[in-house]
Structure formats: C-alpha cells, structure tokens
Image: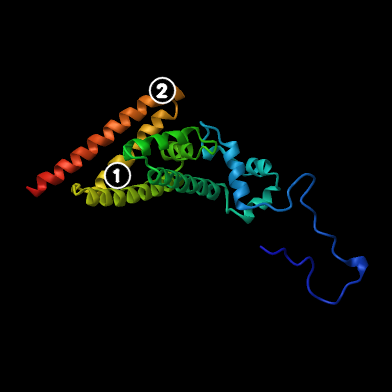
Amino acid sequence: MPDPTPFPSGPARGPASAAPPAPGPGPGRKPQISRDDLIAAALRLLGPHRSISTLGLREVAREADIAPNSFYRHFRDIDALAIALIELGGRSLRTIIREARTRLRPGRSVIRTSIETFMEQLDADERLLHILLREGMVGSDAYKAAVERELRTFEEELRIDLVRLSEAGGRPIHAPALVATAMTRLVFAMGGTAIDLPRERRGEVVEQLVEMLRMIMVGAHALAEHEER
C-alpha cells in the first residue's frame, strides 16, 4: 500500500515547514522482507508439537526481524500465514513423493517407496508434514478445511496414478476414487500415530502401512474382476 501523503495538497511550502523524513526500519531490522521470509520465520518457531494456532503475529515479526506492521504487506492476518503454511506443506509433500516415484528402482514397490518417503518427511528440517498431520486433527475449523483441501488434492493425484497403473498392467480396479481416498486417509492417520514415536519404532508403522495398502489394492482388483464375470 503506498504511503499516505504527508500533508494536504496546497501552496508550496518552504524548507522550515517540510515534512520530517519517514522513520527507518529501526535498529537491526531488515528494510525489506519477502513473503517467503515470513514463512521461514514461522517454520523456525514451530516445533514438532506446536500448533500453528499458538503463533502470534508479533512473535513471527520478531523472528523475521521486522516491525509488526510490515507483516501486513504480505498477509492479511496470522490465519492467512497459517493457511499458506498448510498449502506449502501439501505442495511440498506431493512434489517429494512424485519425484520419489519417478526415481523408482527396478524391483522396488511403488507402495513401499511412497510410504518410506512419506515417513522420512517426519524428520525433515522444514517439519511441513508435521503441520499437515497436526492441524488436520487439532487445528481451527479454517485450518482443518485447508488440510482437507490438501488431502483431496492428494486423493485426486493418487486416483489418476491408480487408473494409469491399472491400464498399464491390464488389471481393472474397482472404484479408483474411493480406493485413493481410503489409502490417503489411512496413511495420514497412521502418520499421526508415527509422529510421536521414536525413530527406531517407525519401521513397524511402515511395514503395517505397506501391508494394509496392499490389502486395499488386492481387494480393489478382486472386486473389479468379480464385477467383470
């Protein structure tokens, strides 16, 4: 937003009555900051067990080393920043899992590779998966709605993959949209359990998830084949 006019328009004024210079950013504060800088500051403040809802605008501004009023140049309020974090978490996780699938080695299971990649994100520095898992359960209605949008995007991308793999393998699949929903919701529910487990015990969750997802896939193929008889 442009700065307001320092004085009403009118006859030219002499040096004695000129407006004082605008105050600077303050000692030690950054004169310019980007939207990404604020997101990075918020991520630094969020630990593995802290909800976005506990973040304060002044706290984020202090971490970003800016005056609180500068926050509003990029976000309407702290809730808008929180939703941006949730959306970033969803985009980042989808990209990471998609890239893991494209680098799949011969003989490796798509399901296992995807689940192992998902679980690895629990220890990522950015803690973006933590945000999705936590805010989907304990966040405000607005945060839960944002997480729900991300989950539906996951489901749609998975549905497309399921149909593609089904056609490539020549095996029909029953209700791919429903299968994608079941798989996505199961993974995120189990991820919510794994988030509080020590790292050495997460392997158990991976094995359970891989087996559960295989059961869903076997059932989906069996139902489709039964319908064709």
Q: Which residue is mark 1?
A: 181
Residue shown at 45%/25% (left/top)?
199
Q: Earlier in the sequence, mark 2 or mark 1?
A: 1
> Which amino acid, mark 2?
Arg
Residue 192 lies left or right of residue 170; in this view the side is right
> Which quadrant, please, contains the N terminus?
bottom right
**Residue 118, percent across and down?**
41, 37
> Which amino acid, mark 1?
Thr
**Residue 172, percent across and down?**
18, 48
SS class, disc 2: helix
Q: Nearer the viewer, residue 38 or 200?
A: 200
SS class, disc 1: helix
Q: Which residue is mark 2?
A: 201
Q: Nearer the viewer, residue 118 or 67?
A: 118
Crowdedness near tag 2: few (<14), some (14–19) or many (≥20) residues, C-alpha within 10 Å: few
Q: Is residue 24 above or below residue 53?
A: below
Q: Nearer the viewer, residue 146 or 69?
A: 146
In the picture, the disc for residue 198 is none
